[in-house]
Image: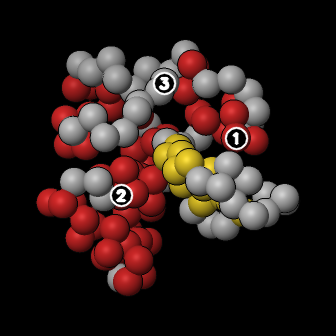
Amino acid sequence: MKKITADKIDFVANYEIEDGFYGIEKNSLNSSIKFFEHCSNEITAVKKYKYHEIFPDAIVYHGAYAIFKALNVNWFFKPLLFCYHYLPLFALVCESVYKVIAQNRAKISKAIGADSCKIK
């Protein structure tokens, strides 16, 4: 993912993020990938939606949506976010596949010999 986004995004391991970072509870970081988009919102209360939450200082995306949002910085992958927004079946399938992968990421990482999905 770092190669695809060409260093346009900072990657931080979930164990490096402190509890309360943009209002996110540390234990929720283990359930899915998060993509933080820094912004200044005129809101005072947190707004929660199915695949993102809006905080005063950031919008936090999670799951497959977060992956497509991150990949969107590369022109080659921009159609994925478009498809996610406008093809409901595509979004449903992507979130379902993401959920299976997220629940089994330790087994998958071990099977392919990767250290990148270890949870600390």
* Residue 55: image location, x then y, percent: 72, 54
Q: Residues within 10 Å of mark 2 (few under 14, many from 20)?
A: many
First along the sequence among labels 2 and 3: 3
- Residue type at tag 1: Tyr
In the displayed structure, would residue 54 be above or below residue 81?
Answer: above
**Could you give the CA–CA distance between mark 2 and mark 3, rounded to whole angstroms?**
18 Å
Mark identifier at residue 13? 3
In the displayed structure, would residue 92 be above or below residue 56?
Answer: below
Assess whether mark 3 and mark 2 are in contact (beta carbons under 8 angstroms).
Answer: no
Q: Residue furthest left?
A: 76
**Could you give the CA–CA distance between mark 1 and mark 3, rounded to whole angstroms?**
15 Å
**Could you give the CA–CA distance between mark 2 and mark 1, rounded to whole angstroms?**
21 Å
Q: Is 2 situated left or right of 49 in this image?
A: left
Of labels 1 and 3, the one closer to you:
1
Q: Quadrant of residue 74?
A: bottom left
Q: Is 109 situated left or right of 11 in this image?
A: left
- Residue type at tag 2: Phe
Which residue is labeled 2 in the image?
Answer: 68
Which residue is labeled 1 in the image?
Answer: 22
Q: Quadrant of residue 29?
A: top right
